[in-house]
Image: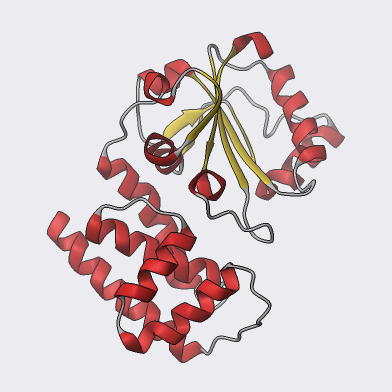
Amino acid sequence: MTDDLLGFYLHGSLAMGGFNPKSSDIDILVITNSSMKMEDKRNLAQFFLHQSNSPYPIEISFLHIEQLRNWQHPCPYDFHYSEFWRERYESDLLKGTYNYFSEDLHVDTDLAAHITIINHRGICIDGEPIKKVFPSVPKSDYLSAIISDYQECIENIEEDPIYCSLNLIRVFWYLKEGVISSKQEAGIWGLKTLPHELEITIRKVVNSYADRKDTYSFEKDELILLRNYISEKVQELLRVLN
């Protein structure tokens, strides 16, 4: 497996300087020269089940180079681990099954966003330079990836106000000015740019994400006001793009 490694790349909040020890994942893409064997997948699952959350959660995808050379969206991959997959892998390993280790083609819409971020803000930890490995992702594919997450945040802002508010602002900023940002950067931009009546809510969100000692509560009305403002602006920008 090690001999097959082409590169090891960091993306997400850690690469962009917005890592929050209490809520952020360590986001990684690994590129290999050839497709992954079943035994390697099982070994990786066992490894990440032990290493993730010690102390930080890991989200990682393995792709082989041909999956990048012939770009398609959603992008195929060989192996993925995140805490969302923990129970699935634990079950497969315990029962000796192959439900999540199969050789069937797996694809992930989010890879368009991850690779775009790597191209703009990523860090090569080891291996070939980013420009030599990763394709230029069409803007339409990147938009498809971030809008999917954006729609979930529109629905779930009351359940997860900090993540969802920052993600809504981040998508709005990208559509408005083409900036690829971390959630932290988006929150700071929102404080400077969005209407005054949203400032208190955004400041609470930004301070909460920055892990300051103050504890904030969020009222439904203020979250709906922020959500509706951004939703209206995003819809206007999407109509222009279409």
* View extreme (top): residue: 3
- Assign the N terminus to one quadrant of the image: top right
Q: Vertical placement of 128 versus 217: above or below?
A: above
* View extreme (right): residue: 94
The percent position of residue 100, horizontal first and vertical second, equals 67, 34
Kindly identify the residue that appears in the image at 26 percent across and 42 percent down: 139
Kindly identify the residue that appears in the image at 62 percent across and 17 percent down: 36
- Give 193 or 26, whichever is nearer the viewer: 193
Q: Is residue 101 visible?
A: yes
Q: Looking at the image, what colour scheme do you see?
A: secondary structure
The percent position of residue 195, horizontal first and vertical second, equals 30, 82
- 71 on left or right of 44: left
- 200 on left or right of 79: left
Tell me where residue 169 sits by quadrant.
bottom left
The percent position of residue 6, horizontal first and vertical second, equals 54, 16
The percent position of residue 148, horizontal first and vertical second, equals 40, 55
The number of callouts visible is: 0
- Assign the C terminus to one quadrant of the image: bottom left
- 211 on left or right of 149: right
Q: Vertical placement of 227 versus 177: above or below?
A: below
- Give 59 or 102, whichever is nearer the viewer: 59
Kindly identify the residue that appears in the image at 43 percent across and 25 percent down: 130
- Give 117 or 99, whichever is nearer the viewer: 117
Kindly identify the residue that appears in the image at 77 percent across and 24 percent down: 43
Q: Is residue 161 visible?
A: no
Q: Vertical placement of 186 versus 118: above or below?
A: below
